[in-house]
Image: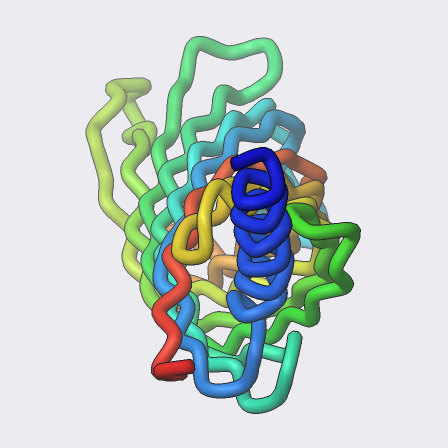
Amino acid sequence: MKNLFTSLAALWLCLAVSSSFAQTSKGTFLLGGALGFSSGHTNTAYNYSATSRKEKQSTIGIDPNVSYFVIDHLSVGLVTPLTYMWSKLDGADQKTTYTSYSVGPLIRYYFPLGSQWAIFPEASYSYGWTVTRGYSYLSGGDRVPVTYRGNTRNLQGGLGLVYFLNPNIGVEGKFRYQSMRDTYNRTDVGLDHSDNNAFDFTIGLQVYLSRNTQ
């Protein structure tokens, strides 16, 4: 009985180790997303002057993604960042909100650490649409709400750590740098573009769907 128990335990250990590497093998699909929060400053430039306006800002982002492992440990796919940001002009009671949605390519590579851990560098670039809601002041001093629409581009790069709960689910944390630029075409108010660059930390959940039958 003792020998049987030892043999079963050894078999289970071998299967657990082999399955941990199967998650990132060629032919596996990766589905999931990440949630992140950051705070910092954003700079808004106007095309009628060489000056820009600096605002304190906070950002919440959700990044759904789908990828495919083209070779062992290397996945390529698409990411669709959804970002909500709010900012306040320094020294003024004026709040502005930004909502953007974009889509673009994503690439990451896994470096296994033992049987259940791996680290991965990741990079993505996406392009899409943005809506900004704020206020404009009339000549008499009255404040009226305004909405600006434009385009956004989002460049991200980071380093993450994943823990495999089982052969199909991984929980991950990631430090990343994010550079966003929203571009507008509002010649009536002189609005040109807005830049937001920040470091943040995201927490995500990924599902690994392998087509391998062995």
Name the residue: 41% across, 63% down: 208
Q: Where residue 131 sits in the image (x, y, percent)?
A: 29, 51
Most foreground residue, 34 or 111:
111
Q: Is residue 92 above or below residue 56?
A: above
Q: Where residue 178 sits in the image (x, y, percent)?
A: 64, 51
The answer to whether residue 177 of the structure is visible from this angle is: yes
Q: Is residue 151 above or below residue 86?
A: below
Most foreground residue, 47 or 68:
68
Q: Is residue 8 left or right of residue 116?
A: left
Q: Where residue 189 sits in the image (x, y, percent)?
A: 39, 51
Most foreground residue, 27 or 127:
27
Number of on-image labels: 0
The answer to whether residue 45 of the structure is visible from this angle is: no
Q: Where residue 67 sits in the image (x, y, percent)?
A: 44, 75
Q: Is residue 74 above or below residue 163?
A: below
Name the residue: 71% across, 39% down: 199
Name the residue: 68% across, 47% down: 117
Quadrant for the C terminus in the image: bottom left
Q: Is residue 15 left or right of residue 174?
A: left
Q: Hey, which residue is sitting farthest bottom in the picture?
A: 70
Q: Hey, which residue is sitting farthest front in the picture?
A: 1
Most foreground residue, 94 or 21:
21
Name the residue: 39% across, 21% down: 95
